[in-house]
Image (tube, rainbow, N blue to C red):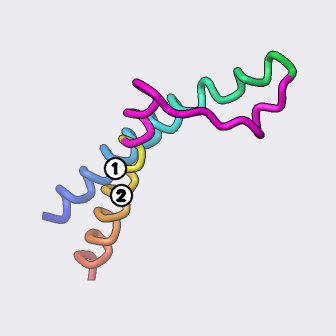
Amino acid sequence: MKIYIEIGLILTSLALITGVILQSKGAGLGGLTGADSGAVFTARRGIEKVLFRMTIALSILFFSLAIIALFLGR
């Protein structure tokens, strides 16, 4: 059972890293016009919203698996 949790942790961490990298690819594009992009908040739509929610779900899954692995290790 412990090996399945560890494999799940590895796969979840890779998916989480990929999701965060995909989110940060377009982060600096608002600053190309000279405007301060840090003060402007826009609504997430389409794939951006799905990616944001997927990242939250993956992080919850990752921390849950990490806690389970901690208890199984004892």
Give me the disc on residue 57.
1
**Type of amino acid under label 1:** Ala
Q: Which residues are magenta?
A: 35-53
In the picture, measured across the screen, residue 58 lies left or right of residue 20, that is left
Badge 2: residue crowd in 10 Å (few <14, some 14–19, many ≥20):
few
Q: Nearer the viewer, residue 58 or 13?
A: 58
User: Split into 4 quadrants, where in the image is the C terminus?
Assistant: bottom left
Q: Is residue 36 magenta?
A: yes
| Residue lying at the far bottom of the rendered structure | 74
Q: What kind of element bears circle 1?
A: helix
Q: Do labels 1 and 2 touch, CB within 8 Å?
A: yes
Identify which residue is drawn at 44% across, 39% down. 52
Q: Nearer the viewer, residue 2 or 20?
A: 20
**Type of amino acid under label 2:** Ile
Give me the disc on residue 60.
2
Q: Position of residue 48 (x, y in %)?
A: 46, 29
Above or below: residue 62 compared with residue 11: below
